[in-house]
Amino acid sequence: MHLFFIVYEEVLEEEIAALLDRLSFERYIMWEEVKGKWKEKHMGTHVWPGEYHTVLVVVKEDEVERLKNEIKDLRERFPADELWVWKTGLEEMF
């Protein structure tokens, strides 16, 4: 099992939701209205508008490449929008 942490600009919310539905993941947690700075600064204010959203997804070994390909496709279709993914092994879940 693997754990994917996905951070994206709020404008990609519908695309990420559709991706999660398409891949039928059994376990994930979403956070909305996350503030921060990575490539751009999005703090939800008039000075730094916009916010990030995040998803933490538990992914089975045989689903890893499919998720990676879906993320690559999103990046190609929306090159101006911020989208990052971190993947790590999941040793234990209880």
Image (cartoon, rainbow, N blue to C red):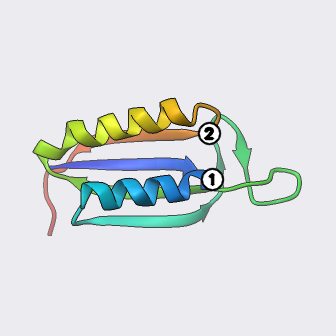
In the picture shown, does residue 94 fall above or below 14? below
Q: Quadrant of residue 79?
A: top right
Q: Is residue 21 left or right of residue 93?
A: right
Tag 2 near tag 1, CB within 8 Å: yes
Q: Residue at x 50, y 48 (%)?
A: 7
Q: Secondary structure at mark 2?
A: loop
Which of the two residues, 70 or 3, is positioned nearer the viewer here? Answer: 70
Q: Amino acid at mark 1?
A: Val
Q: Quadrant of residue 66?
A: top left
- Image quarter in which the C terminus is found: bottom left
Q: CA distance from mark 2 to mark 1?
A: 8 Å
Q: Position of residue 82 (x, y in %)?
A: 59, 39
In the picture shown, does residue 24 fall above or below 11? below
Mark sitting on residue 38: none
Q: Residues within 10 Å of mark 2 (few under 14, many from 20)?
A: some
Which of the two residues, 93 or 85, is positioned nearer the viewer here? Answer: 85
Q: Is residue 2 left or right of residue 21?
A: left
Q: Residue at x 45, y 54 (%)?
A: 16
Q: Amino acid at mark 2?
A: Asp
Which of the two residues, 89 or 77, is positioned nearer the viewer here? Answer: 77
Q: Residue furthest right?
A: 47
Mark sitting on residue 11: 1
Q: Secondary structure at mark 1?
A: helix
Q: Residue at x 46, y 39 (%)?
A: 74
In the picture shown, does residue 76 fall above or below 88? above
Q: Position of residue 27 (x, y in %)?
A: 25, 66
Q: Is residue 18 left or right of residue 65?
A: right
Q: Is residue 78 left or right of residue 67?
A: right
Mark sitting on residue 81: 2
